[in-house]
Amino acid sequence: MNREMIVCDNVSKTFETSRGNVDVIGNVSLTVHENELLVLFGPGQCGKSTLLNCMSGLETVTSGSVTINGKVIDSPGPDRGVVYQRTALFPWLTVMGNVEYGPKVRGMSKSERREKAQYYINLVGLEGFEDSYPNQLSGGMQQRVGIARAYCNEPDVLFMDEPFGHLDAQTRYLMQEDLIRIWEKEKRTVVFVTNNIEEAIYLADRIAVLTNCPTSVKTEYGISLGRPRNYVDPEFLRLREEISSVVDKAL
């Protein structure tokens, strides 16, 4: 097994609100290995996104710790990329402008960053759309830009928060295929949040099943199915039934 990349050690998160404190994460201990595709799966509003935000440094933990490559994480950093459900693309920049933005900010020469950005634009299947603006693209294409932009920053870890959740079923399936194709070619450690059981089994090396809020890890499943995976494969269907029953008991 590859070395440990992310370690959550008894992570808890409490938000202070006008109605009192709200415990969202309760003592989560979890390890993600280098180049692993880990899916955080659980019911809606259980704290999946908050846990992902704590792991990425977008939220500070209330207690416990998160380390990446042995370094304690308490703020965002260039070694981490995040792709959201709603793409946070710059509407005034073209596809090329969005994808090359990170290397540009870091001072990379124009020729070098353009070459790098073009590679990832091609990788996500958007060759020919370099000069298009986000409002000229479909939802799936916008997510491809978001993935290309994240990869172009060459992060150690890629965090994906229900990135395909607002897409129609057919586009969602195609994006899942694309994500696996890209991940197999350009390996990264990926933490992927979803509340869709089929998506979780289709994508994951391992699934961490979370309880309702305050969330904790109910159980984990290593997924040994080969890729590409088939939604109607008997083992796929068996896993779907088993994991669904565990989530039901967690509520």
Image (cartoon, rainbow, N blue to C red):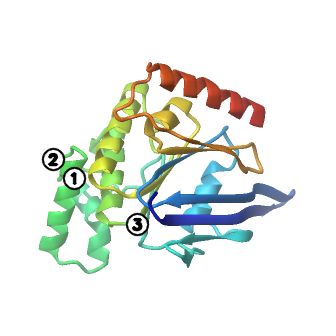
Q: Amino acid at mark 3?
A: Asp
* Quadrant position of residue 16: bottom right
Residue 137 vs 90, above or below: the answer is above
Q: Amino acid at mark 1?
A: Ile
* Residue at mark 2: 127
Observer-nearest of 172 and 203:
203
* Residue at mark 1: 121
Q: Residue at x 75, y 43 (%)?
A: 212
Percent x, y for residue 115?
14, 65
Query: Marks 1/2: CA distance?
Result: 6 Å
Query: Marks 3/1: CA distance?
Result: 19 Å
- Asked whether the beta carbons under mark 1 and mark 2 sit within 8 Å of each other, the answer is yes
* Residue at mark 3: 156
Q: Earlier in the sequence, mark 3 or mark 1?
A: 1
Q: Mark 1 Cα within 10 Å, few/some/many (few <14, many 20+)?
A: many
Question: In the image, is 149 to the left or to the right of 60?
Answer: left
Q: Earlier in the sequence, mark 1 or mark 2?
A: 1
Question: In the image, is 20 to the left or to the right of 42?
Answer: right
Secondary-structure class at tag 1: helix
